[in-house]
Amino acid sequence: MYRGKEVTIMDKRTRELVDFTKEKFGLWDYYLETYGFNRSVNLFNETVYTMSMEWFPNHCLGQEYEDENPDGTAVITIDINSRNYESVIFVMGQTFATNGINFSDKNDIIKWVEQETGLTFEQQFQLHKEEEGELHFKECINGVAVSPSGMIEVNFDQEGRLTLFSAHGHFPAKDMVKIEPYTLTFEKIEDIAKSQVKLIDFPLMEQQRLVSAYAVEELYIRNDQSATISFEVMVDVRGYLKIDKTLDWDESIEDSSFERKEITWHEEVSADQAFSGEPSPDTLPITETEQEKCTIEVRDFLRRVYPSDSGVWILKTLHRESGYIYAILKTNKQDKRVFQRKINVMIDSESLQAVNYMDNQMMLEMFDEFEEPEKVIISKDEAYEKIKGKFDLEPYYVYDFDQNQYVLCGKIDCQFAVHASTGEVLLLNEL
């Protein structure tokens, strides 16, 4: 991140983006305080470079702001390749922009979003929620919802001046979408729907107790019923390499010490890297050799830090992130609770040595103090009959990582649950 005098010394390409941004958003009463470059890997394993800028109002010049930006600061992020803006945020909803972006009504905002993003309303994005001074849009394909979903938000003040814009998503080209008529009905997939009813212990935080209830685990079913796609897979869209290997051993490692090394969460990216489009190391596939070495390293990590847990942990996946290889482990015996035990092991991508880890055990232990749930009286079949008529089955275009294409699916979901002790039908958000 460049700041102070460094901001005045920038190459021609950077200066062009700065001037372009200043004019577009009317930042004539602002000065550029900081800027920097970032890179990420998108759903399609492509490297995306962005430039972030912090513009301070002129009346803040000469004052010190160490921990927070002054009100009215414009924090702006632009995609270097497309020149589309990912986000424009005026701190505390206050703007000092002169001849900036102004709106007269909702239709004016929609037209501006179309112009800004190159997307078409009701074909690639649709209105999701409208509040005072805010419009929220969701990604769609010909009016059909998408997963993982892109989101667009526009905020404006009483004078109609832009105070926030954000656009995050993938918004695929037409050749990445398999268009077909939606033919799924609940009758066709009822057996699958019933199998998604699970008995789960929900924590009631204020009451410090657990409640057993039958709820529906969300699932995507292919329109032709040929396969299903887990909802969990679509929550985080990284390129995961599935391993699914139980790790066991005969002997632990006597030296149980493990020194955590500081993780670099934010990598330094230069202007040359950004403007040349250099591929991120995170786009590289994990080779078979790396896979084997990482598996051995994770097992040795467990032998050292969790010596009594032979056969307890399953190495679920490996993926690259921020220059590291992440190994995700889950226990082979999952209980009924909403939150399950999980360990993330961070592995140096060059040495293939474990350097740090995160274990959610401490968070889960607080539930051990909660009052145990009442005895389960209602059966799964009884619970299903109570909420059978409350299931949702909605069409979704879902990204299939195997086909590298968006395919039409039906999403099974239900906003209701059944109390396993009383049989009462409850809204999920009450649990």
Image (cartoon, rainbow, N blue to C red):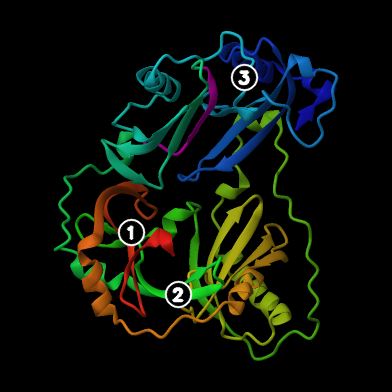
Q: Which residue is mark 1?
A: 415
Q: Quadrant of residue 97?
A: top right
Q: Which is more toward the observer, 317 or 398? A: 398
The image position of residue 400, as x and y in percent, is 35, 52
Which of the marked residues, 3 or 1, is nearer the chain's N terminus? 3
Q: Which residue is painted at 81% across and 82% down in the image?
A: 255
- Residue where numbered disc 3 is placed: 95
Specify whether residue 168 is painted magenta: yes
Can the viewer see residue 187?
yes
The CA distance from mark 3 to mark 1 is: 40 Å
Task: Tell me the crowding category of disc 1: few under 14, some 14 to 19, or many 20 or more residues within 10 angstroms, Cα based.
Answer: some
Which contiguous range is marked in magenta?
Answer: 161-172
Nearer to us of marks 3 and 2 is: 2
Asked if residue 83 lies left or right of residue 402, the reply is: right
**Are dots 2 and 1 in contact, CB under 8 Å?**
no
Q: Amino acid at mark 2?
A: Val
Task: Look at 57% across and 77% down and name the residue there.
Answer: 370
Q: Position of residue 228 (x, y in %)?
A: 30, 62
Rendered location of residue 20, percent (x, y): 60, 14
Give, as a three-letter code, the residue at label 1.
Answer: Gln
The quarter of the displayed image where residue 379 is located: bottom left
**Total tally of numbered discs in the picture:** 3
The residue that disc 2 covers is 211
